[in-house]
Amino acid sequence: MAYVAIESDERMDEGPEGLQFQSFLRTDARAANQGSTNASRGYISDGPAKSSGFWTLDYYQPYFDVDTKTVLRRCYTTLLPRSPSYLSAHLTPSADLYGPFWTLTTLIFALFVFSSLASSIAAYLSNPSDSSAAVLEYDFGLLSTAVGLVYAYGLGVPVLLWLALRYLGVGEWSVVEAISVWGYGQFVWIPVSLLCVIPVPVVRWVLVGIAFLFSGWFLAANVYPILATADAKPVRLIIILLAALHAGVALCFKILFFSYYVVKEVGPQDPLP
């Protein structure tokens, strides 16, 4: 076997110190990872994404980013008692705060306006000869009552329930989902408030009873499965407390806002004058 001498390059003789290697894999991977993360969030950014704190408006912006069609669908589906689970079927991929807020606000407006209209109709039918009885008068004390009652029940109760369940170790839903369920669940009271302008006591009680059953069934169907996931079975008894509270709110709606009758009542006598 013959050996041939090969003259080595001067740069090769310098050894490993003369070689310089530069890798772009880590930089490319980091950039690709950042790009995929931004793309999954729905935006493209030249720099790293900055997280917003809960005290900023940007933190709550995604919960108000919903179109009108979605809000209307989430409203009228609460009137379908045989619909599937509302959380998984209609609050997917995410719940919102825009719809519940405006549902409760519209309910406040409806209670105030239609209650004032019912009062004016009752006053006119009681004394048709009095021209001043036909003037629509507003009791702004009812407006403050409606604001406190509706917001306390539609916003305060779900937040307190969520906190209580978190304390009991039940974390199957978020506070936004709780507010969404409660807010959308009050939608049935808006058309009922309009129909309660009818000055017939029995009709009003029937309408309030229907709204109580529809909204109560909707809340129970979505809240009880959450309570059933608790390890302690007595937690399920909270549904009884919620049902009693819901009945009290329905009774308040009827007595405070739709107890205006003419002097000579139309139809059977009101069982609870």
Image: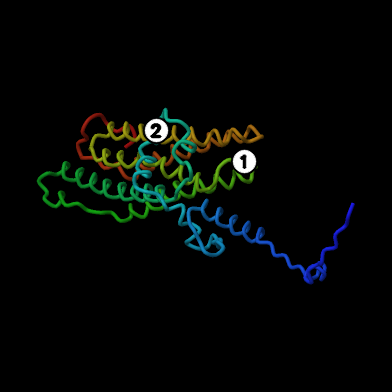
- Amino acid identity at mark 2: Phe
Say above or below: 137 vs 8.
above
**Front one among 21 and 100:** 21
Cα distance, mark 1 to mark 2?
26 Å
Furthest toward the right, the residue is 1
Q: Is residue 123 left or right of residue 174?
A: left
Say above or below: 71 vs 81.
below
Where does the C terminus fall, quadrant-wise? top left
Q: Is residue 89 left or right of residue 270?
A: right
Crowding around mark 1 (Cα neighbors within 10 Å: few <14, some 14 to 19, many 20+) is: some
Q: Position of residue 92 (x, y in %)?
A: 47, 41
**Front one among 89 and 230:** 89
- Locate residue 17: give its quadrant: bottom right
Q: Name the colouring of the figure.
A: rainbow
Q: Position of residue 156 (x, y in %)?
A: 49, 49
- Amino acid identity at mark 1: Val
Say above or below: 18 vs 53.
below
Q: Which mark is residue 258?
A: none
From the viewer's perspective, is the residue at label 1 or at label 2 nearer? 1
Q: Is residue 237 left or right of residue 191?
A: right
Q: Position of residue 242 (x, y in %)?
A: 50, 38
The residue tagged 1 is 170
Marker count (numbered): 2
The residue tagged 2 is 214
**Front one among 60 and 203:** 60
**Residue placed at 55% from the left, 33% from the top?**
225
**Residue placed at 36% from the left, 35% from the top?**
211
- SS for callout 2: helix
**Residue placed at 38% from the left, 48% from the top?**
104
Crowding around mark 2 (Cα neighbors within 10 Å: few <14, some 14 to 19, many 20+) is: many
